Image (cartoon, rainbow, N blue to C red):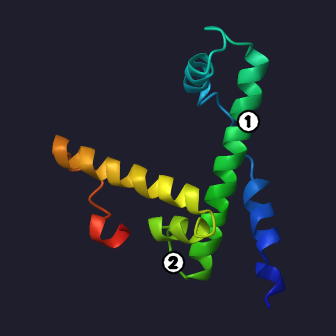
Amino acid sequence: KFKCFSKSKFLQKILSAKIIRKRNFHNEICEIVFGFGDSQFPVKRLILVLESSVIRYVLKIISLISYIAFWRCSKRPSVNDLFFLLRRKYCKLIRVRYLLKMKFMIEKIMGSSKGKNFTSKTIF
């Protein structure tokens, strides 16, 4: 259809952008590795490899959601774009819906004013 807006070129431009790679998930990955039965102080190389794969996966998901929002002529990606992306991966879709439902329940119990952008009626 439109060669300049092909999915591969769009994803390539987003993923090739220089992103400052900090050690954002270092502590969390150490705790996860320890929780799965590894040592309390895992090898740093293992943590770096796991962290880079997590960052690549998150960037890929965000770029695909941005691509969907672009074709919907939306300024920002929404939760519905994530649902559309995961529509064929039923297990992941159910997990995301469950986590969002739990988030709203916790916010309701705690009385938080955050997260009022999405109502439970529009998501579920």
What label sits on residue 74 in the rendered view?
2
Residue 30 location, x and y as percent?
Answer: 60, 19
Q: How far apart are marks 2 and 1 (CA)?
A: 29 Å
Which residue corresponds to the image point at 31% horizontal and 62% vertical from the top-left? 117
- Position of 30 with respect to 5 (left or right) is left
Q: Is mark 1 on a helix, strand or loop?
A: helix
Q: How busy is the neighbourhood of tag 2: few (under 14 within 10 Å), some, or many (20 plus)? A: few
Kindly identify the amino acid type of the residue bearing the numbered disc 1.
Ser
Q: In which quarter of the image is the C terminus?
A: bottom left
Q: Determine the image quadrant of residue 56.
A: top right
SS category of the residue bearing label 2: loop
Residue 64 is tagged as none
Q: Position of residue 42 (x, y in %)?
A: 69, 12
The residue that mark 1 highlights is 52
Q: Which residue is drawn at 49% across and 58% down?
A: 94
Of residue 105 and residue 91, the one placed in the foreground of this image is 91
Q: Quadrant of the N terminus?
A: bottom right
Q: Which amino acid does label 2 sit on?
A: Ser
Q: How crowded is mark 1: few (under 14 residues within 10 Å), some or many (20 or more)?
A: some
Q: Which residue is drawn at 32% across and 64% down?
A: 118
Q: Can I make out residue 19 in this image?
A: no
Looking at the picture, how far across and down is residue 34, in whole percent? 59, 16
